[in-house]
Amino acid sequence: MPRALQELKQRLAEIVDLGKVAGLLAWDQRTMMAPAGAPARAEQLATVTRIAHEKFVSEEIGRLLEELRPYEESLDYDSDAASLIRMTRRDYEKARLVPTELRAEMSRSAAIALSVWDEARETSDFGLFLPHLERNVELRRRYVACFAKAQEDYDLLLDDYEPGMTTAEVRAVFHELKAGLVPLIAEIAERADAVDDSCLRGSFPVERQQAFERKVLESFGFSPRSWRIDETVHPFASSMSSDDIRLTTRHHETDLSAIFATMHEFGHGLYEHGVDRALERTPLARGASLGLHESQSRMWENLIGRGRPFWRRFYPELQEAFPEQLGSVDLETFYRAINKVQPSLIRIEADEATYNLHIVLRFELEQEMLAGRVALADLPEVWNMRMREYLGVDVPDDAHGVLQDMHWAGGSIGYFPTYSLGNIVSAQIWERLGADLPDLDEQIERGELGPLREWLRERLHRHGRKFMPKETLERVVGGPIDPRPYLRYLRSKLGEIYGLPGSR
Ligand code: ZN
């Protein structure tokens, strides 16, 4: 290995360490820290972020990348070293355009906004949150201004979450998605009574939910040696290394939504856990993009976790955990209930079909916020109007409306579209999986998830971020992003449940 590559790897390892330290501080803030610790935590995060950024945009990194150009050309495109140099160069060319002070301020103001958001959401007080949202949006405008002009300003934010994808591409994909979903949701609405989900509401003691989830997670591949799961307000997954995976979830005594949130976060954790250990302490040791990440979480939550084979295996145990609630509810009734389509207020609790309309709404609003086409003070009103228009629901208060998600508090604008991209990709991967593992359903029903995990690891997880998202997807499914498999999947599954014409 050339000396320049050794030096680059050494420097990147330290920068990755600092990023993981920031991740740990953020994890702690969301799971353990007492609320009054927020101002000091914001400074700590800003400090670590600033040091990492300074180290990364240093002239030495630029010099090493230049020096490595001829070596890079001699390498196989797929090799770890070639990917490391190529992806680092892309990151470097972006990062060096952003002043360190701006980077640190984005991190500081996000940490403060997050703690205010907690309170604002609890008291449904948008006014309390508004100045922090204004600050976050302002900082994103300054961030966008650091770069050469893109086709659309939003492209520059989107690229941080879905590298290489443009707003126009997302718009086209969402257009096709919406064109398939709107009529499907309308057909289902005419038969809304066909599914009764009352069995999912009642009293489900939290400790029993946790014990059940633990069994599910262990059958999925969760092991206490490398994984943790903790309570939080807004579930997320993070990792400090491929062998230090942190899942979070949240429980309600009155329903079973936590089970699905937990399976979702497991999917994120498994992706990080499956990255080739040779990539550890490099910028490649994580998922290729948030869309690909979400394809994994949504696959475990929905394609597996809301499927018949999984519940054939686990429903008896769930009944045993909640005999008063589910003892006399048969599997088919339960399966239909967990797949009920019903426009609702909260994105993370939405069914598989209407979920995407929540995303389309946020994608449109974010572009308008960034461009200043909607005044931030008017956001609750605009939100509520669109919810009525897209989903036909009335928003009772901002906690169930514009304040429900943490993303804008955390400064993550441009992130939301990746959720629906993930849904779409999850179905593309699932079709591919079905072709390669013809008895997948039987395996899931027997609780044998090894072959599925191995397929995902071999085809997707182990590569981490070695390739751009489009290249990665091409390698996994043999083509570009395509909403048709997802629409086929929904129409077939929901068509059967609701007895729609043309389905069995
Ligand atoms: Zn997710």
Image (spheres, grey):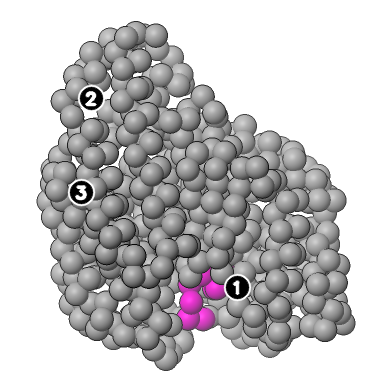
The residue under label 3 is: 103
Q: Looking at numbered disc 3 in the image, what kind of residue is underneath it?
A: Arg
Q: Looking at numbered disc 1 in the image, what kind of residue is underneath it?
A: His
Q: Looking at numbered disc 2 in the image, what kind of residue is underneath it?
A: Ile
Q: Residue at x 34, y 65 (%)?
A: 37
- x%, y% of residue 418? 42, 55
348 or 278, nearer to the observer:
278
Quick one: label 3, few (<14), some, or many (20+) residues within 10 Å?
some
* Callout 1: SS: loop
Q: Where does the magenta region start and end?
A: 344-353
23 or 201, nearer to the observer:
23
Q: Residue at x 25, y 81 (%)?
A: 128
- x%, y% of residue 379? 26, 79
User: Which one is earlier in the sequence, the residue at label 1 or at label 3?
Assistant: 3
The residue under label 1 is: 251
Cα separation, mark 2 vs mark 1, equals 45 Å
